[in-house]
Image (cartoon, helix red, strand yellow):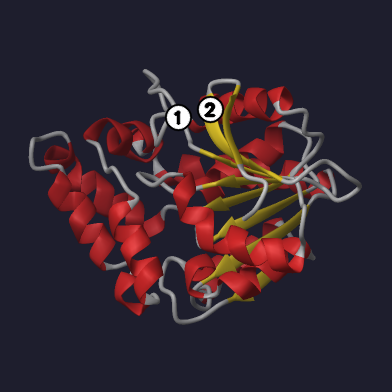
Amino acid sequence: MSGTHRQYFGDLAADSHGTADDRPPLVLLHGLSYDRRQWGPVLEELAVVDPGRRVLAFDLPGHGDSPRRDSYDLGEVAAVVHRAVNDAGLDAPVMVGHSLGGALVTVYAAMYPVRGVVNVDQPLLVGGFGDVLRRAEPVLRSPAYGQVWTSLLAGMHIELLPPAARELVRTATTPRQDLLLGYWNEILVTPAEDLGERRTREMDVIRSSGVAYRHVSGDELPPAYRRWLESVLPDVAVTVLPGGGHFPHLSHPAEFAKILAG
């Protein structure tokens, strides 16, 4: 994407694209262990369908070129992102997040002004995933922690992605133990019911503020989860981009760019 400038806003490294105009700026947040490089295919397509759009793709704390923190509590990380957004001079951006980033942009939207939210393949209820993590916690805290990440990665269906995107997912990642334990700490220490109530309260705030919320997934949402999502956010828009597993934005970057441009 032409006009890219790598710089820091607040404490976060970012690729900065485009210039401010009457279009809402976009803020892109990657998933756990990845970095801002993952948005490359989407940004290339966005430059075609929405040229010159103001976009910031951040490295989350502890990822890429952004410094580590002692705590990766989502509320605290959202505050770090907000300081970076303010430093960049963005006013009420559209927040776009993949995987963990999808949870983070939801938390952010319940705390700070936004124009919209795009959650890419991140269920907000931990459900069975929380059970898996809690069972794996002894291994996560051991030198063999990488086995847990490898096991989870196998279920993300990277093999479905185009070759270049598959290589990007496999190489632009640093699954360090401190990141996994830090960002997943909320799931490890908080009962699933309490987490569900927390996410419901956040969605109540988003609904009451009239923020447009879109969930983009690589497969149809489980019926029970979709019922919950539509109950807490009746106007939610759900888009399925099939065939890319956990990475629908990389399987269908042109279609995803059109969603962002819209």
The type of residue carrying mark 1 is Pro
Residue 2 seen by the camera: yes
Q: Number of marks in the image? A: 2
Locate residue 48 relative to residue 36 in the image: left or right. right
> The residue tagged with tag 1: helix, strand or loop?
loop
> The residue tagged with tag 2: helix, strand or loop?
strand
Q: Residue at x 26, y 48 (%)?
A: 133
**Depth check, front residue: 32 or 184:** 32
Residue 159 on image: x %, y %: 30, 75
Residue 196 seen by the camera: no
User: Compared with residue 78, is residue 247 higher up or lower down, i.e. above or below?
Assistant: below
- For residue 61, the mark is 1
Residue most extreme to the top? 70
Q: Which residue is drawn at 77% across and 52% down?
A: 53
The type of residue carrying mark 2 is Leu
Locate residue 167 relative to residue 207 in the image: left or right. left
Q: In which quarter of the image is residue 47?
A: bottom right
Q: Quadrant of residue 229?
A: bottom right
Q: Residue at x 19, y 59 (%)?
A: 151
Q: Quadrant of residue 163?
A: bottom left
- For residue 259, the mark is none
Residue 207 on image: x %, y %: 78, 50
**Circle 2 or circle 1, nearest the eye:** 2
- For residue 12, the mark is 2
The first of marks 2 and 1 along the sequence is 2
User: Compared with residue 164, is residue 37 higher up or lower down, i.e. above or below?
Assistant: above
Rounded to the nearest angstrom, the CA distance separating label 2 from label 1 is 7 Å
Q: Residue at x 49, y 45 (%)?
A: 36
Residue 102 on image: x %, y %: 55, 51
Tell me if label 2 and label 1 are in contact, CB under 8 Å: yes
